[in-house]
Image (spheres, grey):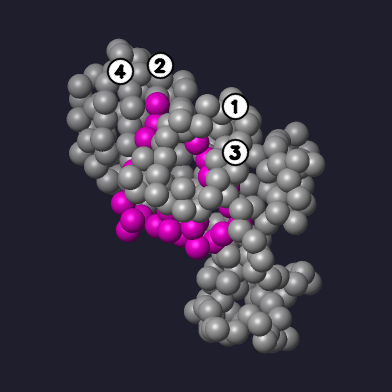
Amino acid sequence: MKIRLHQFLSRTGHFSSKSKVKQSVWDGSISVGGRIVKDISYEFNPDKREVIYNGIKLSLPSNYHYFILNKPKGLICSRINKHERALNKKSVFSLFENLVDPNVSDSLVTVGRLDEGTTGLLILTNDGSLVNEIANPSKNIGKTYYLKVSKRISSELIDSIRRGVSIDMVRNGVTEEYTTMPARVTKLSDYSIEVTIFEGKKRQIRRMIEVLGNRVLQLHRLSIGSLDLESYSLDPGQYKEETREEIVQRIAA
């Protein structure tokens, strides 16, 4: 059965994001059947042609795994590179070392990312199709966060988040103005709110709050769709293996 190259690469679990998949192809780092391929939509049969990335043979996992993690503060959602290692950074993937089969832990990617200072619900899997299914903005899956901020929350701040906030985004080295999609907001106290967003721009919530003259002190993801972290009773750093069906059903519930 034929598959597009970018779909195959995403499902190997070797890449942390779709952008890294595309860039690896465009950089000429991927060969299929002994030939460099720079077309992300190239179709081939993975049972008949070998895929090599920087000297490493890639293949689709024979078994998919799905984990629900309560991400603790201070961990990043990518594999550690040399620079980060020198800075003593730690990754969420370190939580799985020596506890999960290395062939599984090495193939895991995160479904979206939480920055180093953000805690809460994170899904990790080696099933690239699920990553795309949840992360695709067209699916309109809400992600709900608890925020504690430094200044008293005004009605103007809440109204602005509900309408959309203009923030600066960097694309290919160029800074562009971007207006966020309307979000849901529930005020919990003078200094805390719950926000549900339907997209996932880099550090989006922190940037929105900063533009509006406030600052995030605590950011915790509570849920993805109807998949609620609280129902799993996980302490920070703990995780639970789940089935694909359960995750999809709970998100869509």
Identify the mark nearer the N-term, 1 or 4.
Answer: 4
Give the SS element for disc 3: strand
Q: What quarter of the picture does the C terminus occupy?
A: top left
Amino acid carrying mark 2 in the image: Ser
The residue to which callout 1 is attached is: 236
The residue to which callout 3 is attached is: 240
Query: Quick check: is 92 in the magenta stretch?
Result: no
Q: Residue at 46% across / 39% down in the picture?
A: 203
Looking at the image, is 184 positioned above or below residue 174? above
Looking at the image, is 133 positioned above or below residue 27? above
Q: Position of residue 193 (x, y in %)?
A: 33, 23
Q: Position of residue 106 (x, y in %)?
A: 72, 54
**Residue 143 showing in the rendered view:** no
Q: Nearer the viewer, residue 175 or 196?
A: 196
The residue to which callout 4 is attached is: 188
| 141 sits left or right of 103 in the view | left
Q: Position of residue 77 (x, y in %)?
A: 60, 43
Identify the mark nearer the N-term, 3 or 4.
Answer: 4
Q: Residue at 26% across / 30% down in the picture?
A: 185
The residue to which callout 2 is attached is: 150
Q: CA distance from mark 2 to mark 1?
A: 24 Å
- Which is more foreground, mark 4 or mark 2? 4
Q: CA distance from mark 3 to mark 4?
A: 29 Å
- Which is more foreground, mark 1 or mark 4? 1
Q: CA distance from mark 4 to mark 2?
A: 14 Å
* Quarter of the figure with residue 228: top left
- Which is more foreground, mark 3 or mark 4? 3
Q: What quarter of the picture does the N terminus occupy?
A: bottom right
